[in-house]
Image (cartoon, helix red, strand yellow):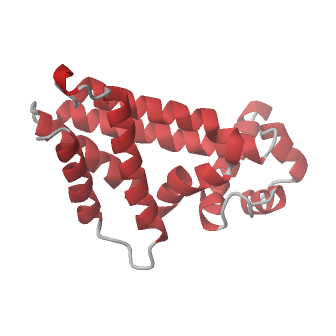
Amino acid sequence: MSSEERLAERRERLIRSAYILYADLGFPDTTIEKLCAAARISNRAFYECFTGRDELMWVVYNRCVRDNLAAVSKAVEQAPNTLLGRIEAGVAAYIEFITEDPRRARILHLEVRRAGDCLTSSRQRAVAGFTQIIETNLLQVPEETGVDLHLLVLGMIGAIQELLIEWVLAEDPPPVESLIKTAVYIFNRSLAL
């Protein structure tokens, strides 16, 4: 292996280890030493790959967001060409992607907040990405309502985030199908469908 290939391989091992540890232990309790032990690399090698835990969390979070945006975009594009069909497909794709792996749900909805300032701009970009999908593909708010489309979308995104936080933290999590039905209902009622 070349030195670039070795670096890329170590970097990927760290990303995989961070994905597990940030979700299992939480961002605050995941030390560089724990990351290095899980990835089977030295502390020195860690700093050849990342500047610190914050940068590694940034990479893990943004990879999850990128993959989720792609899944939602694809589902909306392939949905029946009706507003309700696009809403159902987009909401289901989002929630199914998140709940497919509870670690992903934890990173995207809990640890992002615990990581603090290092992910503020990434979180804002993620919300902007989902907002654009919704505004472009799902919403048709009559102008005479006086409702600010952007604020409405942010409210609907916030509602889904809270449903997923409940799913992550609940001792007896609600069924995924129930989350999807509830989120679709929120979208439909928000749009008065």
Q: Quadrant of residue 148?
A: top left
Q: Quadrant of residue 110?
A: bottom right
Q: Quadrant of residue 10?
A: top right
Residue that appears at 56% across and 54% down: 107
Furthest residue in direction right, as rendered: 44
Question: Is 13 above or below relative to 73?
Answer: below
Question: Is 91 above or below relative to 36?
Answer: above
Foreground pick, 95 / 149: 149
Image quadrant for the C terminus?
top left
Q: Position of residue 45 (x, y in %)?
A: 85, 45
- Image position of 11 (left or right of 108): right
Residue that appears at 42% across and 56% down: 162
Q: Position of residue 25 (x, y in %)?
A: 67, 67
Q: Position of residue 145 (x, y in %)?
A: 20, 27
Residue that appears at 39% across and 79% down: 172
Furthest residue in direction top, as rendered: 143
Q: Position of residue 97 (x, y in %)?
A: 37, 51
Question: Is 84 above or below relative to 180?
Answer: above
Image quadrant for the N terminus?
top right
- Image position of 157 (left or right of 122): left
Foreground pick, 95 / 113: 113
Asked if residue 60 can be seen in this view, the reply is: yes
Question: Is 138 above or below relative to 27?
Answer: above
Foreground pick, 98 / 38: 98
Foreground pick, 71 / 95: 95
